[in-house]
Every structure is written in structure tokens, then in C-alpha cells.
Amino acid sequence: MSEFDLIARYFTRPAQPPGRAALGVGDDCALLRLTPGMQLAVSSDMLVEGRHFFADVDPAALGHKALAVNLSDLAACGAAPLAFTLALALPRADEAWLAPFSRGLLALADGHGCELVGGDTTQGPLNLCITVFGEVPPGQALLRSGAQAGDDVYVSGTLGDARLALQALRGSLKLPADLLAQARIRLEQPTPRVALGQALRGIASAAIDVSDGLLGDHGHLLKQSGVGARIDTSIAINLIAASTYSNWAGGIISSQKQLECVLAGGDDYELAFSAPPSAREAVQAASRQAGTPVTRIGRIEAEPGLRLVDGDGKLLAGRFASFDHFA
Amino acid sequence: MSEFDLIARYFTRPAQPPGRAALGVGDDCALLRLTPGMQLAVSSDMLVEGRHFFADVDPAALGHKALAVNLSDLAACGAAPLAFTLALALPRADEAWLAPFSRGLLALADGHGCELVGGDTTQGPLNLCITVFGEVPPGQALLRSGAQAGDDVYVSGTLGDARLALQALRGSLKLPADLLAQARIRLEQPTPRVALGQALRGIASAAIDVSDGLLGDHGHLLKQSGVGARIDTSIAINLIAASTYSNWAGGIISSQKQLECVLAGGDDYELAFSAPPSAREAVQAASRQAGTPVTRIGRIEAEPGLRLVDGDGKLLAGRFASFDHFA
């Protein structure tokens, strides 16, 4: 199948009524209308076989994830998704792979009104590069650089389950089949927090999406804000969805492992954000509006660095005592 | 060197005064200001080692080409470049490669006022994905679909030299060293016709950039316009810059080879466009304004298909008689 046949069959669809694309797939450029006065938000992510996904991953899940990681960047900026481009290198034009990949990709795109407007396909080692476009009112984008001493620190949803699944799939941890299935959905089909990001505009002082682990990513936010933070590990440890399950399953997962997955996991695609204590009610209202739970796990401090404390506020010693370990 | 060090060292620069990026490399998204009322033009291209370039290509030339092929898409739409993202998979963080790559890339970017605003770097088989953003007044983008029977057919610059260089580098053709050097520049450091594309707004009825060979690419334009064309091969054959040179060199390149390179070459990154005969003076004025020569090589006809004729208007038989051969 030629490149043009591929594009026609799997990535071109009839124009959708409310579309933003003045011109979509099939010309030299895609042309997009922005809402007058809005700023364009852009993010680009590249996924490589063997590094970001296993060769035998379900193609539908991969299509979902390739777009989800980009939508998560828009979410972290509080931007509303508009459209995306897909560049795809494939070892060969395998319809048994392309059909479910395209289905998974476009299902998530449709769920967010995010139109596929162009891209590229070529022969080569499997590589997916998506660039996503969103819009945000000028001056209202959530940045990494706005956290202030005294602000609360929040995370959305759950953390660490993707890491748990990854370890089980790599064979370094044994999980019961049903627990693995549950955690694997978090690894392979993450949910970008697009509605929450937009609901937090004007409320959160800073935000970032958690893709490489909470400590590392939140560390970037702290660094760019010129502040530090204190995280309550007695709260954070329960952010892993598998925790309730694992207690029931009789302690398959040690509390050390739980905390490690939560703090230094990756592939969570949750939002970590800060907001002043005066905004606590507004944060909860945004959470309800977006249908996404948020948990307050600490506070921003003037002193740089990230300090992990127990439920009594005592600094943790040992492996998780230092943020630098994960930098 | 970590991903963050890489980004900092080679792809982050101090903000440039006239920049369009409200926020550039280093947050979850880049934020871009468009000129009020303009449409966004977007194009994405992926370049893979072994397919789009040789493993031993000069990294500075590769940096240039990776952006040039994207700027060429903007040119074909008549859009003015604004900014781009770069996603890069590298087998390893090799500074001896990254430094010249970044230099070649950013030199071309600066020449077009096109800001690097974000992207991604990861470990993997060498793969470059650039997504470029431009702006164009609503309704003024050059499309593939506007050619009308009776229009003239033009191409910019020269065609076929990149193909000649490729054949020599692959060993299927022998060229004198100085002729190879001249042709190789066209292969490895193409010149996107950005100024010409913008100058042709309101003049050209349709346009496409020639990346996969004139017949194939112009065939897309004809198909999307629902028309056909007649191309005068006695004019087209001289579009290869090496032709004058090769005559001097004593017929190293047969006229059959010349025509093959011009019509079915690739990597030219010239514009093929149509315009009504009433616009001939305007086309020449646009050409002078942009400093890019253009050559009238044929005309659009109502009958679908692409017909190659000799200097007397007689249909060519044989290998180049049918466009379908190259589709």
C-alpha cells in the first residue's frame, strides 16, 4: 500500500461540522482558524518502540497513548485542544496494525474535539510523533514558573499504577492477573486531564504534567518557580489506586514499593499543581466541574529543594529523603 | 548528557527581540501569538536515516534540510514562517553531531525568522520530526485545488540536480567531482521558496512543492484541481542546472537522463504552480520581488492526465508518455 493509500484509508475522514480546520489532510499545509484573540499552545512528543512502548503493545492502546501524552501537555497549560498532526515511521504498511492504531487514536481525538489535520508517513523503525495545537486566552496559560511560598501542592487522580504495571510486564514484580490488568490500563491508556487543566485557569499558580515521575517533574516546576516544597508521604502513598487492592491482596506490594511507584514512577499523565490556600474551595469546585479528583499533598516553601515528610511532619531519612536522587 | 542538558545546550537560545513565542522551550507547551486575523498554516515532516538521508551526511546540512523541507510546505501555501518544533530520536547524545546539526538548523531558521519553540528529544534510531507554523491571511493560502483549464504551468528555480547527486552518491552514475559537489548542495541543502510563495498570493491559482518529483507532485495538484496539463519537455529538460555544465563536460549525462531527473527526480523543493495567462506580468514581478527565477513549462487543460509534448507540441511516446507511470 502506498503512502497516499495509507493516508486515505486510515487518517482521512469526512470534514466534521464543528471543525477548526479550514483545510485538513491532503494539501501542503493544514490551515487552522483560532478563536479571535486566543493564543496558540503547541506541544510535540515522540514515541519510540522499545523505549516508550513494547513492540507487542495493543495498537489501539498505542494510538490512544500517543495522543494522550500530547493532550496532557495541553492540559498542563490549561489549553483547549484544537487539532493535531501525526508523523509516523512504520517498518511496513501493516493493515492489521494500522486499523486498530487509527481507531484508538481517533477515538481519543473525537472525545476531545481534536481534529487530525495533517502529518507524514514514511518507512522506518516504528516512531510516532504527534504535535498538538490548543488555544488559551492570553496571559491565562498555566505555567511552571508561578508557584509561591505558602501555596498548597496538589496532584490529580492517581499516581504510580503505570509504574507498577511496567515493573510487572518487565518481570521485576509479580502481580495477580486482575491487578495487572487494572494497572496496565493506566500504563497503556492514560487519561489526559484536559478538563481539569482548563478549569484551573485563574486558580492554579503553577502546573506541570507528571510524565516522568512526581518528584522529577514537580522538581522542574519548583526550579522554574524558584521555590521548594514539602510533600506529606503519608498522604502521597495512598495515591496509587492499587493500594487498596493490594492491601486486600495481602501485602503483595510493600509500602516502600508503593511510595516508590507514586513518587518516582512515570507515565501517570496526571497534573501536579499549586494554588494559594485561599483558593481551596475554587480548586475543589474545578475538580468537581472536571470530574477529576485532586489531592492536596503538601505545600510550597521558599527554601529550594523538595522535602519528604511523614504524617507528623518529620523529614524522611533514607532513599526518598532527597529530591536530587531523582533529578 | 541528559535530555535536559541536551535541550539546554543545543536548542535553547536567549529570547529574540521580535519573537512570536510568548513562551518558548522549557514549559509543557509553547505559546504563540498570531497576527490578529491571520490563519495558522501547519506542516509536519519526518526524516529517517537510510530513507531520507545517508548515515554519513554532514549534520549541518541535515539540520538545514530537516527545516527546509517543512519551510517548503509553508512556501507552497504562501504562508509566512513563524515558528517550529523539533522532535529528535538519537541513538546517543553525540555532541560532535549535535553541535553542527543545531548550527545548520538554526542558521536556516534565523534566515526566515522562524523560532524554535519546543519539541522533544529521546533515545532511538535516528529520526527527525519537525512541525512548522506559519500564518496566512484567511482565504489567501495557495491550495492544490485551484488550477483552471487555460492556466499556465510554472516551476521555480531548477529541477533534477538533487536526483543527479543521489544517483552519483548511490554509485549508479559517475559525475566529475565538481559537478557532483554542485548537485550535492541541491540534494543536501535545498532552498525553500518561502518569499516566492508569499509573493504569489493572489496571483497563482494553485501551487504545490516538488519534493517527490515534478510529475508525481504536479499530478497531485491536477487531481485535486480536477484538470490535466500539457508540459513542454523541450523547455523542462533545461531546468536541470547541471545541463549547461554537462554539455561542457561532453555529454556525461544523456538527454534521457536529464529529462528523467527533471520530471521524476525528487528532493527539489521548488514550487510548481499555475496562474492565468492574464497574470504573466504579475508572475514575473513576483519572481523578481522574491529573487527566484520561474519558468513557464506548460498549460492546464480540462482533460485529466498529464501529457508530455516536444517543442512542436507533439505528444511524446515511450517512457515519459504517461504520467501514471510515476503516480
Image: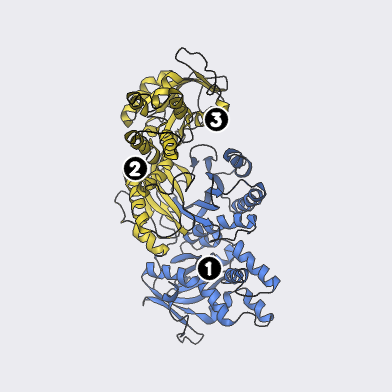
Chain colours: A yellow, B blue
User: Callout 3, which amino acid?
Assistant: Phe
Please state the horizontal and vertical placement of residue A299, each as a whole percent of the image: 47, 19
Quarter holding the C terminus of chain B is: bottom left
Q: Residue B15's spot in the image, x, y percent?
A: 60, 40
Residue at x 40% of width, y 45% of height: A67
Q: Residues within 10 Å of mark 2 (few under 14, many from 20)?
A: some
Res B262 → quadrant = bottom right
Q: Secondary structure at mark 3?
A: helix
Q: Which chain contains the residue that carries disc 1?
A: B
Q: Are marks 3 and 2 on the same chain?
A: yes
Pinpoint residue A319: horizontal percent, then vertical percent. Answer: 54, 23
Determine whether, in the image, residue B16 is placed left or right of residue A191.
right
Q: Name the residue that disc number 1 marks.
A: B266
Q: Could you confirm whether marks 2 and 1 are on the same chain?
A: no
Instruction: Please state which amino acid type lies under the numbered disc 1.
Output: Gly
In which chain is the residue bearing label 2? A
What SS does tag 2 mark? loop
Mark 2 belongs to which amino acid? His
Give whichever of discs 3 and 2 has the lower sequence position.
2
- Tell me, yes or no, whether the two marked residues, 3 and 1, touch with CB atoms within 8 Å: no
Cα distance between the residues tagged 3 and 2: 33 Å
- Residue B302 position within the rendered picture, expressed as x and y whole percent measured from the top left: 36, 76
Residues under labels 2 and 1: Cα distance?
Answer: 38 Å
The residue lying at 66 percent from left, 51 percent from top is B100
Q: Please, which chain is the residue tagged with disc 3 on?
A: A
Residue at the image point whose x is 54% and y is 18% from the top: A317
Name the residue tied to disc 2.
A112
Q: Residue furthest left?
A: A17
User: Is residue B7 placed above or below B39 in the rendered structure?
Assistant: above
> Real-space Cα distance between discs 3 and 1?
47 Å
Q: Which residue is mark 3?
A: A326
